[in-house]
Image: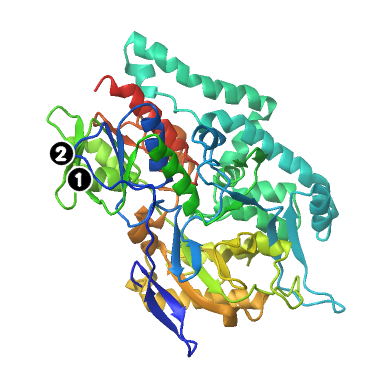
Amino acid sequence: MASRCVFIKNAAGALSIRPLTRHTHSCLSSELKPEYDAVIIGGGHNGLVAAAYLQKAGVKTAVLERRHVLGGAAVTEEIIPGFKFSRASYLLSLLRPQIYRDLELKKHGLKIYFRNTYSYTPLLEDSVMGKPPRSLTLGINKSENLEQISQFSKRDAKVYLEYEALLDHFVNSIDPLIDSIPVDTAALTQGSLIKRIRALKTLKPIMKTGLHLGQYIPHFYEIITAPAAKILHRWFESEPLKATLATDAVIGAMISPQTPGSGYVLLHHVMGELEGHRAAWGYVEGGMGSVSMSIAKAAASHGASIFTEKPVDHILVGNNGKTNGVVLQDGTEVRSKLVLSNATAKVTFLQLTPQDALPDDFIRGISKIDYTSPVTKINVAVDRLPNFLATPQKEGTKSLPHHQTSIHLNCEDISVIDKAYEDASSGIPSERPMIEMCIPSALDPTIAPSGCHVISMFTQYTPYALADGRKWDDKERNDYADRVFECVEQYAPGFKASVIGRDILTPPDLERIFGLTGGNIFHGAMSLDQLFLVRPLPSYANYRSPIKGLYLCGSGAHPGGGVMGSAGRNAALVAFADLKTL
């Protein structure tokens, strides 16, 4: 499949290929100047956040995006006429409240549809005495949650609120670390006396976190190091509940619930907040590209210059070891004192940066970052809502609460998720993949024609490299998508007949289209050896690089992946502080 094409059902019912539709952005600048104070490589959400903070501080900033559309992985594309898809990232929760307030994103058009029901797990089981198969539905109503869980285990219902309260305590405890620049270990151990004293301030968030954790430090240590399955097995006995909760521990990661450290991934996905609502997830009106566009508008309102279709060829580095700007692929030079890269660490330092300007040990470290990805994203246009056997719907097109949430398929049991992981570990796309299905058009009427819907399927596990030397060609893509659709059909008969078109993005596609090395949505695995003080490498967790004036501002830096914006904000603050010394 070409990077800007999509499979669409023709009149005969077969899937044909059609080019994607392009759209322009009102916040884009028209004239690229030869010099700025700062240049941002990449118009993803973190790059745009960095630009907004720098420009707001008076630093003349330009954003250079290589694609025709802003947003990086947080992007909206009309890949089928009339259907607007959040083509990669598809839900909002992790965006930091401070960024939301500082950049006045609501004023710049960001509108969120909150989901009162946030999880729906239908089961594949025979009906009993005419009753439909069971399902587990969780949402903001605590009493309804306990009633739902009691279907499977009254004991689990009793401890569920205690489990949620403990996770909330952990999230509140680590909150100071997310918005803070990691400890400057080099300055603490090797810097001058003045630098060491200044670096002591970077210990404050860690101390604050430790004090807040208090007596729960051992429990916190366990959850960030243990397999999620071990933690969930201790708390609960019902498999549908454990498997549903386990999805947060593996989503986007080539790990199973049995992998040590998967508990942190679970924690990472419950640390969000939307307009004061903790752990809330929502849809963005117009798709996830509206998040990026609201940030871009905020940056442009302060004077930032934003450009699309300006791919960077390489970063300029002077003989003095400082960056001098960038060179575009068409040969255009753009000079600047600061360069902030929203690309992955591998792309930034191994493809865009002159290798003779970097230390050998730094190059070796960057080359060993784990970018393994299990994700194939499938975007689907349908002419009606899926009708699930577990929650049958009467005739009509009105969405029900379970349509508005994250629908977990093939999640009846943790062992099913484990088996899916084992398949991919052998180079085989999962026979029964874990599927997180979202239907944002069930709440947002602006993204699909009347009566029709857009469906996002975040599926795993699929390996980047297939076994036996096979390549991800159109046949392999369609064979896997057909397998996913067969799974959906088991839960919601008639689904396949409702499909108008689909867009299949395997790990190599995510890499090629969005610049996500290995197809990894987090810009690098969120494993304990690649977090906080060692993200992307030890001694370089403070967004700086061996080249003065060159910074990493994307998800490959602390605090990692998700539409958070913290990396962009933090990198901008560090770069601004350094500007007077460059």
Of the 4 image quadrants, the one containing the C terminus is top left
Q: Is residue 465 above or below residue 214?
A: below
As measured in the structure, the alpha-carbon distance from the residue carrying label 2 to the one carrying label 1 is 13 Å
Contact, mark 2 vs mark 1 (Cβ under 8 Å): no
- Residue identifier under label 1: 314
What residue is shown at x 39% (from left), y 34% (from top)?
302
Residue at the extreme top: 193
Which tag is nearer the camera, tag 2 or tag 1?
A: 1
What residue is shown at x 58% (from left), y 65% (from top)?
435
Question: Which corner quadrant of the image does residue 323 belong to?
Answer: top left
Image location of residue 383, percent across then percent down:
59, 76
Image location of residue 508, percent across then percent down:
36, 63
Q: Is residue 14 above or below residue 316?
A: below
Residue 28 horizontal side relative to residue 409, left or right: left
Q: Residues within 10 Å of mark 1 (few under 14, many from 20)?
A: some
Question: Which corner quadrant of the image does residue 188 belong to?
Answer: top left
Q: Which mark is residue 356?
A: 2
Q: Which mark is residue 292?
A: none
| SS at mark 1 in the image | strand
Residue 458 horizontal side relative to residue 358, left or right: right
Q: Is residue 209 above or below residue 189?
A: below
Q: Amino acid under label 2?
A: Asp
What residue is shown at x 38% (from left), y 13% (from top)?
196
Q: Nearer the viewer, residue 125 or 286?
A: 286
Can residue 428 be seen here?
no
Of the 4 image quadrants, the one containing the N terminus is bottom left
Q: Is residue 16 above or below residue 140?
A: below
Q: Amino acid under label 1?
A: His
Image location of residue 22, percent across then percent down:
37, 63
